[in-house]
Image (cartoon, rainbow, N blue to C red):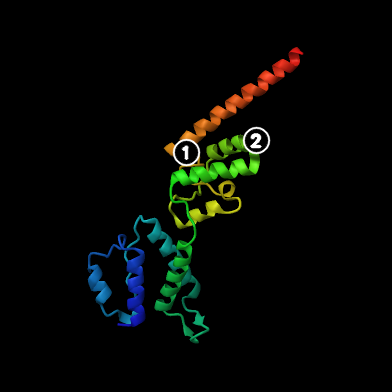
Amino acid sequence: MSSNIKKIQNEISELFPDKLEIPRIATKKEIMNAELDNEHIEFPEPTDSFRYREYMEIRDRIFKKYDGKINPRTKKKYDEVTMVQMANDNYRKLLNKKRVDSMKEAVKHFSEFYTSKYGKDAIKRMIKDMERKRKETLKVGSLYSSRFYGKNGPQDYDIDGLDSGLDNMNAESMKLYKSLKKKSRKTRKSKKTKKVRKSKK
C-alpha cells in the first residue's frame, strides 16, 4: 500500500474520529488495511455532521477543478491521492478560522456589532434584521459561520435561529428580541411625552 494513501487515511480518521461511517460491506479496519486498486480511496457515506459535509464540499470542488488536469510540478495528471491531500490541507486552514461556537456567542456579537456601528439607531436596525427572513443562513458551529465575524458580518449574513425570522428564533435570540422591543416601546413613549410637553408650552 502506498505510504501516501495510508497517511491520508490516518488524516481522515483524525479529522472525523466519531463521524466516519463505513459502509456495511467492510469495517473501518478492513478498508484502512486493504490494498487499494489504482490508488482509489474509500470514503464513507455523507453524514449529518457539519464537519463531514463541509469537508466533502471542499473535496468535491477540488476534484472538479483538478481532475484530468496536469500537475505542473510532476508534469503528470493529478492523481486522487494528491487531490485528497489538497482537500485535507484546505480544510485544515478553514478549521483554524474563528467560528461561531454557540448561540450565546452569536447573540453577543450581533448586539455588539449593531450597537458599535449604529449607536441610538441600533435597536431599530437589530429588530428589523431579526424579523427579516432569509433562505441562506449560517449554522452555529459550521466552518462558514466565521463569515459572521467579517467586517459587516451580522449585517451581510444571518445565523440560523438568530436573525433569520421570527418563526425560526432560538430561545436565546427571543430573549434579546423581546428586550429590544421593550426598549423600542419605551423610546417611542419618551418621544411622544416630549412632543406633548412642547405643544403645551
- Residue, x 59% and y 46% (percent of image)? 155
Could you tell which of marks 2 and 1 lies nearer the N-terminus?
A: 2
**In the orientation shown, which residue stands out farthest toward the bottom?**
75
Q: Quadrant of residue 6?
A: bottom left
Quadrant of res 4: bottom left
Q: Secondary structure at mark 1?
A: helix
Distance Cα–Cα, label 2 vs label 1 = 20 Å
Can I make out residue 160 in this image? Answer: no
> Could you tell me residue 13's position as x and y percent?
32, 67
| Residue 62 in sight | yes
114 up-or-down from 41: above or below: above
Is residue 55 found left or right of 190 in the rendered image?
Answer: left
Left or right for 189, reference 50: right
Q: Amino acid at mark 2?
A: Lys
**Residue 120, label in figure:** 2
Up/down of 123 relative to 26, above or below? above
Q: Which residue is mark 1?
A: 173
Q: Is residue 60 above or below residue 50?
A: below
Total marks shown come to 2
Q: Quadrant of the C terminus?
A: top right
Q: Position of residue 80 (x, y in %)?
A: 40, 77
Element type at marker 2? helix
Q: Nearer the viewer, mark 2 or mark 1?
A: 2
Q: On the rendered structure, is 11 left or right of 92?
A: left
Residue 34 location, quadrant: bottom left
Asked whether 6 or 95 is in front, the reply is: 95
Could you classify mark 2 by the number of other residues whose Cα lies within 10 Å: few (under 14), some (14-19), or many (20 or more)? few
The x, y position of residue 25, in whole percent, is: 22, 67
The residue under label 1 is which amino acid type? Ser
Q: Position of residue 27 (x, y in %)?
A: 22, 68
